[in-house]
Amino acid sequence: MKKFALALVCFVAGAVYGFGIIFPPDLGEKEISYSELPVIPYEAELTITIDDNFVVGELKQTFYNPRKFNEEGVFNFILPEGTSIIGFATWDGPTRIPGVILEKKKAIRTYEELRARAIDPGILLPAARNLFTAKIVPIPPRSTKMLELVFAGLLPEVDGKVRFVLPFSSQIDSIRFERIKVNITVRGRTELSEMKISGLPMSVSGGGKVFSSEDEFEKITLSGPLEIDYSYGEDAPVLSVAAYSAGDSTFGLAIFSPPVVSQKRGRNLAFLVDVSASIKDYYYQVRAAAEKCISAAENFSLACFNDTIVHFSGDRGEVSRFLDGITPAYGTDIYSALTDFYSHRAKGTDALILITDGFPSVGETGQKMIRTLVESHSDIPLYIIAIGEDVNGNFLEKLARITGGSVIYIPPGAEESTVEDEVSRYLLPYLTRKPYEVKRVEFNGRPVEFYPPRPIAYGGIACPIVWAVEDSLSGKVRV
């Protein structure tokens, strides 16, 4: 392992992080420069604690108003994939004011009422998938405002490797901080082979089952997502279980990691690629994802769609030129693209790969109609690569689940190499490894209802299963 000083020097030179930003209230989806921000990021302290792939992140971020008048704005924070907000607060000097999550219309109305009284309500507004916003009441001139945010979720593990990504807003190219402190703790199995932050090795202390890293930086400019990669030096157990009690109930989480068994299916692939206007800023990611998947296929078909459909008819060596010649534009007709595929699919097609942000805008836009169409062809697994900062995740996950497929999310701002890595780690194994359907979960010999219902597990990929019973914490679990 490299010495801490060397790792620190390398890290500062190329550090990239994602944090919350307060944007002007009327910005919309426009890009903005650092100098146009109503208040500027000043300090941040990020604490990441990971227990057997369950992550809890705590962010305390201070903003400064350098101007001679009051400022206000909208705090945007892009959540890591698989996590949810579990706490939010603003600070009025030494006083902590807990926030609340409300329906959007009610939240805006409440905010406007409180704003008139100059009280900071700390209201968190549900927004797009993985994007949460909070309206921040005017910050007085030449003063600071601290926000506190807590999020939690389960990180995917593939072949002993785990990745945590804190995305970065695509509406600004970089942000500057006076000071940043980052604390990372990983607890779980007895051997951690390495840890990297944004691709650079970090000095890790500890041993046994606890590993940690702590770093502090001053006057630093950040321009991308924070990425933490770590690898276990031992295989995951086939089944591990955690439980906790709440009132009269016991909640259980089982992580099922079956052995890797390769299979021949998955090599005859069909691709539908969204090239509508909404994907324009992320088209380089779309192209990278498509080319990576196609490179793993023995046989493939490819069609690009917006409000029309264009079929690729060349050989593998011409795919890059074909995709380079497309300029994303017009609306998104997912229904017609799927109908075209199902009507003309080649015999022996193993899976359909759909690359999109998931927002139908022309043609048949009813999500129920699209789900019904996919359900009528559920013999073909549908795998979806979701790209974009504003992704229709709930809709896409329902489509994939109907067919036994899955959705992978590409982090906003991810470079082409990261996109290729995400596809290699989180999609290709589903196409080339034997699936295991979980049909029954028992607790102390009794069957229990579990979620998701009848999940499909794949070799080397951790599959979470959740249930609840009115029982004690002690017991035997069988999957």
Image: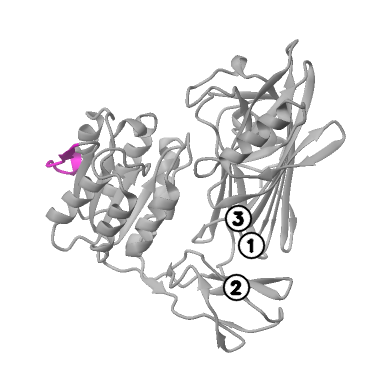
Q: Which residues are magenta?
A: 308-317
Q: Relative to 82, is 276 above or below?
A: above
Residue beneath disc 3: 153
Tell me the distance, in whole angstroms, between the alpha carbons under discs 3 and 1: 11 Å
Relative image position of residue 261 (x, y in whole percent): 38, 71
- In percent of the image, x 42 and y 45: which residue is there? 392
Q: Which residue is mark 1?
A: 52
Task: Say if 114 sits above or below 245 in the image.
Answer: above
Q: Circle 1: is it few (<14), some (14-19), or many (20+) Cα within 10 Å? A: some
> What amino acid is found at the position of numbered circle 2 in the picture?
Ser
- Work out how far the residue at label 2 is from the one at label 3, CA to CA, in angstroms: 17 Å
Is residue 370 shown in magenta? Answer: no
Mark 2 or 3, nearer chain start: 3
Question: Residue 300 versus residue 172: which sits nearer the camera?
Answer: 172
Percent of width and height locating residue 260: 42, 69
Report the front residue among 216 and 34: 34
Label number found at residue 240: 2
Q: Is residue 212 above or below residue 30?
A: below
Q: What amino acid is labelled 1 in the image? A: Asp
Quadrant of res 473: bottom right
- Left or right: 420 as drawn, with respect to 20: left
Select label 3 or label 1 by which is in front: 3
